Amino acid sequence: MIVIVSYDLKGSGNYSAFYEAIKKQGAWCHYLTSTWIISTSKTPVEVYNAICSHINEPDRLFVGTLTHGYQGWLPQDAWDWIKKHGLNP
């Protein structure tokens, strides 16, 4: 499964533990400032539960799945990564 993690970090803290928690969820791709794409066997709820303790109000966090029917403007190696991990547009 490919999971998308997207966020707005509005606090003034150190978010290194948050980023490290995201990286531990599976193979990842990070080409957009506030969005990570993760290949994982975990559900979005499991990923959320693993990373949410590293942010606070007024931060925002969204975790969902990437399925067929997507498009965007990314470097070729990002598209290659997505295809490698099981999804073709």
Image: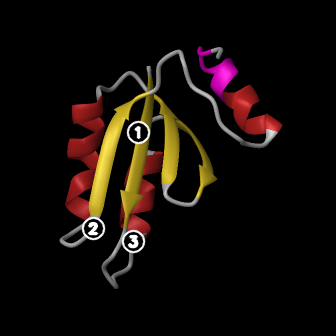
Instruction: Kindly indicate whether the residue at mark 3 contacts the one at mark 1 (C-beta within 8 angstroms).
Output: no
Assess whether residue 5 is covered by the magenta stretch. no
Q: Earlier in the sequence, mark 1 or mark 3?
A: 3
Mark 2 Cα-neighbour bin, 10 Å: few <14, some 14–19, many ≥20: few
Labelled disc at residue 79: none
How far across and down, in percent of the image, does residue 29 sit? 60, 42
**Residue 84 in the figure: left or right of residue 13:** right
Labelled disc at residue 15: 3
Q: Nearer the viewer, residue 54 or 24?
A: 54
Question: What secondary structure is marked by label 2?
Answer: loop
Q: Quadrant of residue 10?
A: bottom left
Mark 3 Cα-neighbour bin, 10 Å: few <14, some 14–19, many ≥20: few
Q: Which of marks 2 and 3 is nearer the N terminus?
A: 3
Assess whether residue 85 is covered by the magenta stretch. yes
**Vertical relation: 5 (above or below) 9:** above
**Vertical relation: 2 (above or below) 59:** above
Q: What stretch is highlighted in magenta?
A: 82-87
Between disc 2 and disc 1, the foreground one is 2
Residue located 41% across and 50% down the image: 6
Labelled disc at residue 59: 2
How far across and down, in percent of the image, does residue 42 sit? 33, 26
Labelled disc at residue 25: 1
Q: In which quarter of the image is the C terminus?
A: top right
Question: What secondary structure is marked by label 1?
Answer: loop
**Vertical relation: 52 (above or below) 1:** below
Instruction: Kindly indicate whether the residue at mark 3 contacts the one at mark 2 (C-beta within 8 angstroms).
Output: no
Instruction: Kindly indicate whether the residue at mark 1 contacts the one at mark 2 (C-beta within 8 angstroms).
Output: no
Q: Quadrant of the N terminus?
A: top left
How far across and down, in percent of the image, does residue 25 sit? 41, 39
For the residues labelled 2 and 3, the Cα–Cα distance comes to: 11 Å
